[in-house]
Amino acid sequence: MTLLLKLITFTLILYYAKCDYVIPPVRYEEILVPRYGNASLPCEFSFIEGTDEMGFSWLREDIIEEIEVDDIYAYIQQKFEYKEPERVFSFHGNRVELEEQSFNYQDRVKVDVSEISDGDLTLHIYNVDYIDEALYTCKAFSPHGKGEIKMKLMIQEEEEPPVEFDTIDNTTVVRCASSGWYKVPIVKWLNRREQDISENSTMLVLEERQDGSHRVSSTLSGVKSHEIYRCLIRDAKKARRARTIHRKLKKGVLREYGEF
């Protein structure tokens, strides 16, 4: 009987401990950000109550891109190298830890320390570029629980800002302005038939940064008030994307070798 009571007591202790310790399911989100803009990666946990005995980290891993090949030798000979995740931001022992922070994120990331005690661990990355496209993981723990959130940060390839009608010297025009930043901006205008009518447009630089990126506006003339116009803005200057490439065989390739 004594053994039974001990088992019941131990079970109750585990039950109430489990109720007090929260492990939320892993969440996955995708964030799209204009090039040279600022990214905010949200991360919030309800089990964080104050900063004592808690800690969290933001980690970064390359995006894995799979390409199909029909060369079995190229498939077999590929090397799978494990890369240690880069540390983007860490907070432990009631202080920000920068000792192991990746060089790529020094002076470019921030977490509002005043919000940490409320469980808000949102990461802000400034002046993002293709090199920042990656999988980001927010991991946190406290005496009341632990959890993680994964995010895929992608650079917006093409921006389509709102189009507004205006009048210049009694002539109807349409305008658009970028919210993103571009090193070599290209503005393309389309009508409702998807015809390129950019030759009737002009571009104006609204702002310029020290890194040579711009915010621009564009004006299209020779327009009709009943027509529908689209303004598309992209950057002609591309940069290297951070990717880990995995080759996979095209379907049916192994049949040539007697396998299905």
Image (cartoon, grey):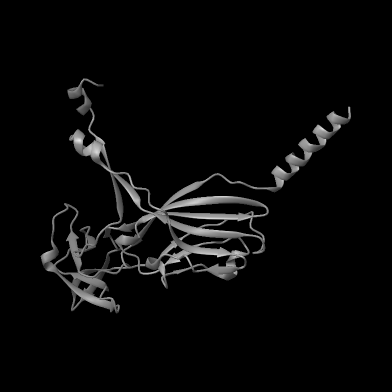
Q: Residue at x 41, y 64 (%)?
A: 102
Residue 3 occupies quadrant: top right
Residue, far right? 1
Q: Quadrant of the C terminus?
A: top left
Q: Is residue 29 above or below residue 177?
A: above
Q: Residue at x 21, y 20 (%)?
A: 258
Q: Is residue 193 above or below residue 91?
A: above
Task: Give the number of marks.
Answer: 0
* Residue 236 located left or right of residue 50: left
Q: Quadrant of the N terminus?
A: top right
* Residue 92 located left or right of residue 164: right
As rendered, which of 59 and 231 lies closer to the eye? 59
Q: Residue at x 56, y 57 (%)?
A: 44
As rendered, which of 129 and 223 lies closer to the eye? 129
As rendered, which of 63 and 227 lies closer to the eye? 63
Q: Position of residue 237 (x, y in %)?
A: 20, 65
Q: Is residue 153 visible?
A: no
Q: Is residue 60 visible?
A: yes
